[in-house]
Amino acid sequence: MPDRTCIACRNKGNANILFRMVISPVGSIVCELGRKLPGRGAHCCFDMNCISKLVSSNRLEIALKGRHFKIDSDELLQNVRILLRRNLEGMLIASKRKGVLTFGKEAVFKKVKLSKVGKPFVSKDISPNNLMNLKRISEEFYVLPFVMNELGEFFDRRPTGVLFINDALLVNSICLRLIQERAISNG
Ligand SMILES: [Zn+2]
């Protein structure tokens, strides 16, 4: 995949570490991961400083020459967060479809002890008790930007606080998006 350049900091990266912006017919900025939307686009890092530089400078105007658009930093951040969360949701659902996802703390804890490639994931509102039990058996786990109810809805089951994904590739892709999501979230 060819390298793309962040128009704010000029760092180059592959399409995985940048998001792309295009202008819709009504002049709003539409963000995407990858490159599907037609038209002239510009890339930016998942980084608060880069995003605020887009808003405070004329770099986006220059990159998207000839396009008229409105830019609002809160709205742009919010759109990128939604994009990342949807992507995470898609990967979680994909892991269920692929048969590499385990629910329920007993089953997850068993997997943690047995699997070499998989990793545990928890909802952001996991109960302190479950978290403590997980920490006893695993040093490594990842907090998803979803609450138990949201995770339950993704999988069409009851609220879910602990998951295990037994697929190294999916775990890596999810962890990359989690890092990016955290980098553009407040606190
Ligand atoms: Zn950048």
Image (cartoon, rainbow, N blue to C red):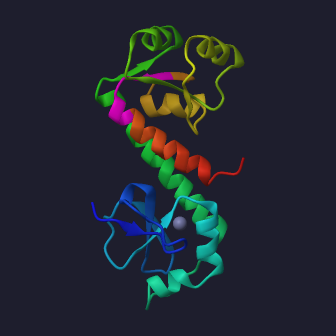
Observer-nearest of 152 and 116 = 116
Observer-nearest of 143 and 136 = 136
* Residue 91 image-quadrant placement: top left
Q: In this view, does 87 lie above or below 68?
A: above
Seen at 64% across and 18% down, the residue is: 131
Is residue 128 at least partly visible in the picture? yes
Question: What is the number of callouts on the image?
Answer: 0
Seen at 54% across and 45% down, the residue is: 179
Q: Could you tell me residue 93's position as x and y percent? A: 38, 34
* Residue 116 image-quadrant placement: top left
Question: Which image quarter holds the N terminus?
Answer: bottom left
- Magenta run includes residue 37: no
Q: Is residue 154 above or below residue 47?
A: above
Q: Could you tell me residue 155's position as x and y percent? A: 43, 29
Q: Is residue 62 left or right of residue 76?
A: left
Observer-nearest of 73 and 43 = 43
Q: In this view, does 72 lie to the left or right of 11?
A: right
Is residue 92 at least partly visible in the picture? no
Q: Could you tell me residue 48's position as x and y percent? A: 63, 61
Seen at 58% across and 37% down, the residue is: 146
Q: Could you tell me residue 2's position as x and y percent? A: 29, 65
Q: Is residue 107 left or right of residue 81?
A: left
Q: Is residue 181 above or below residue 25?
A: above
Q: What stretch is highlighted in magenta?
A: 163-170
Q: Residue furthest bottom?
A: 66
